[in-house]
Image (cartoon, coloured by chain):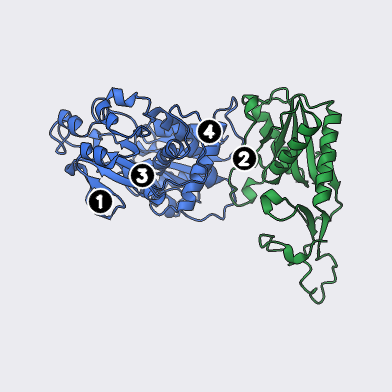
Chain colours: A green, B blue
């Protein structure tokens, strides 16, 4: 298991340093420690399985377009595209980025967010009409990001099908949205945090970590 | 960011954030569906006390592309012509629930007054106040310069902009013409300096403002000398603001339009002196034949038409950064 001392400084200030803090007197909640639920090999296997499922469900990779949702969804889309190119040689290994910032429903509740980039693979000529779009995100939680992504897609064109791949589904949906491909279903409580770390974004080894937050 | 009133004192990080956001906004404007839902339900008031076509239309387009409601209020034919004060107009706009006010006024400092007098709690965007500042124009100029000279978008401006996050370090910009009456020049000097560019103002001595020695730039009275010896990467021509000059064609500021044009007008001959990558800007509207010749204005290295398109993207970015997000915003 991942020792708590390896957690980077960037973790949310509200979460206690996992593992190292002695439990404060009176706080009987045992959920303050961080747990690694997926390691590097688990994530690699889950992505390979998802790639096979995508090909199986769509009977090949024709018209397939992977769109990652920043930040970590983009890296996951990149890795899925590599695997798909190995399974289906006809697939070019291309993937795109879909920024959903300007479509979010919580813009007025948060500090101003920087707008990210939306990039479609060059071979598409700027349209996603009649494509099989697979949205890729790291954690599926309330479903609000995916709702924003569906609106963003709508402004880019009219895909034939839209599917959703998530590395982790932690439940607590607030909208009628479900994933088509899930790396791992993680039963969590709302007060817990699920963090996905990827080597090419965060440095260090790939991992999925749950940490409890004392209420 | 609560208001955008001036480029003086705008931090480098905020300036780069504005430019990067503009680049993302510009990317959405090449789509078939240019409209974004981001500011749905917000109201933007264009409060124009001075005549303006392109700035007002640009702000109106930007607000509409972000789905905000736009109310145009021009002084002519409104309560202002009946003698209403800025304060009473502001209180009216406050009562109507404006979320942002875009203001152009002939008095320097009008936007600052509107933002800080406590008359309304809307975000204020300065769209030009007297001879003081015009920040969105400077931002669109900087954005255009960055795309071409740092981002390598190519001469037709259609290449991929690779300048995200970059500043303008080392870029040389000559700002030429009627600096005295130009809020565009003031805004540009401070913004370009903040972004790391070097600026030289080129102007007849009569059109250089008092106090220019405190600005972060050089001043020259000779256009040909500056172009040949300093080799600027971008030349920004300013409009000769004859409506602000009293008496005669050039007022008391220069002897004749012909003489001004000979000494400070930009033409194909002067363009040929510049390095091959150099670009020519003009904030518009142009006086063709006075400060810029038709040949220079229509040259492939002139980015004047692109500036207009970039203006919409920059104003979308400014509206987004002012209006999206919680109300706990800091005054700029």
Mark nearer the viewer, 4 or 1: 4
As drawn, B59 above or below B321 = above
Which residue is label 4 attached to? B160
- On the picture, is B174 further left or further right than A137? left
Give the residue displayed 78% in from the left and 65% down from the top: A3
* Pointers 4 and 3 within a single chain: yes
Q: Which residue is mark 2?
A: A102
In terms of depth relative to the viewer, which is nearer, A8 or B31?
Answer: A8
In the picture provided, is A167 more to the left or to the right than B236? right
- State which chain disc 2 sits on: A
Marks 4 and 1, the one that precedes in the sequence: 4
The CA distance from mark 4 to mark 1 is: 38 Å
**Residue at mark 4 shares a chain with residue at mark 2:** no
Real-space Cα separation, disc 1 to disc 2, in angstroms: 41 Å
* Residue where numbered disc 1 is placed: B212
Q: For the point 68% across and 54% down, which residue is it?
A: A203
In the picture as drawn, the residue positioned furthest to the bottom comes out as: A25
Which residue was labeled with disc 3? B188
């Amino acid at each position: 298991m991942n020792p708590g001392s390896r957690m980077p400084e960037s973790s949310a200030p509200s979460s206690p340093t996992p593992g190292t803090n002695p439990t404060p007197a009176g706080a009987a909640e045992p959920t303050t420690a961080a747990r690694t639920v997926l390691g590097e090999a688990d994530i690699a296997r889950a992505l390979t399985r998802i790639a096979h499922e995508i090909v199986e469900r769509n009977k090949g990779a024709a018209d397939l377009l992977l769109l990652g949702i920043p930040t970590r969804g983009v890296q996951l889309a990149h890795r899925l595209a590599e695997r798909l190119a190995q399974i289906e040689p006809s697939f070019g290994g291309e993937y795109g980025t879909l920024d959903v910032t300007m479509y979010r429903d919580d813009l007025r509740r948060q500090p101003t967010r920087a707008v990210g980039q939306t990039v479609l693979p060059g071979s598409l000529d700027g349209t996603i009409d009649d494509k099989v779009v697979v949205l890729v995100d790291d954690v599926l939680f309330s479903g609000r990001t995916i709702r924003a992504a569906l609106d963003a897609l709508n402004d880019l064109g009219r895909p034939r099908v839209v599917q959703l791949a998530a590395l982790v589904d932690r439940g607590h949906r607030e909208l009628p949205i479900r994933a088509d491909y899930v790396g791992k279903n993680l039963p969590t409580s709302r007060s817990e945090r699920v963090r996905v770390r990827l080597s090419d974004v965060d440095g260090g080894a790939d991992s999925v970590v749950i940490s409890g937050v004392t209420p | 960011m609560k208001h955008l009133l001036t480029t003086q004192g705008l931090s480098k990080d905020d300036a780069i954030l504005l430019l990067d956001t503009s680049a993302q906004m510009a990317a959405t404007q090449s789509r078939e569906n240019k409209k974004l839902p981001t500011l749905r339900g917000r109201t933007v008031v264009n409060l124009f006390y001075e005549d303006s076509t392109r700035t007002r239309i640009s702000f109106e387009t930007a607000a509409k592309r972000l789905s905000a409601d736009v109310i145009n209020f021009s002084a002519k034919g409104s309560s202002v012509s009946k003698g209403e004060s800025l304060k009473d107009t502001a209180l009216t706009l406050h009562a109507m629930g404006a979320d942002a006010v875009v203001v152009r006024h002939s008095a320097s400092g009008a936007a600052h007054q509107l933002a800080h007098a406590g008359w309304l709690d809307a975000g204020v965007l300065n769209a030009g106040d007297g001879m003081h500042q015009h920040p969105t124009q400077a931002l669109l100029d900087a954005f255009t310069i960055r795309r071409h000279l740092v981002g390598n978008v190519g001469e037709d401006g259609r290449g991929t902009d690779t300048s995200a996050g970059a500043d303008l370090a080392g870029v040389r910009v000559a700002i030429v013409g009627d600096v005295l009456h130009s809020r565009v020049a003031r805004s540009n000097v401070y913004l370009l300096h903040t972004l790391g560019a070097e600026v030289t103002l080129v102007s007849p001595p009569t059109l250089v403002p008092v106090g220019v020695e405190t600005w972060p730039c050089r001043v020259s009275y000779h256009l040909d000398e500056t172009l040949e010896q300093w080799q600027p990467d971008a030349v920004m021509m300013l409009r000769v603001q004859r409506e602000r000059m009293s008496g005669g064609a050039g007022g008391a500021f220069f002897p004749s339009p012909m003489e001004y044009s000979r000494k400070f007008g930009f033409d194909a001959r002067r363009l040929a002196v510049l390095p091959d990558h150099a670009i020519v800007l003009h904030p518009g509207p142009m006086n063709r034949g006075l400060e810029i010749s038709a040949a220079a204005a229509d040259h492939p290295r002139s980015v004047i038409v692109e500036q207009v398109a970039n203006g919409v993207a920059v104003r979308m970015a400014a509206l987004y950064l002012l209006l999206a997000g919680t109300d706990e915003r800091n005054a700029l």
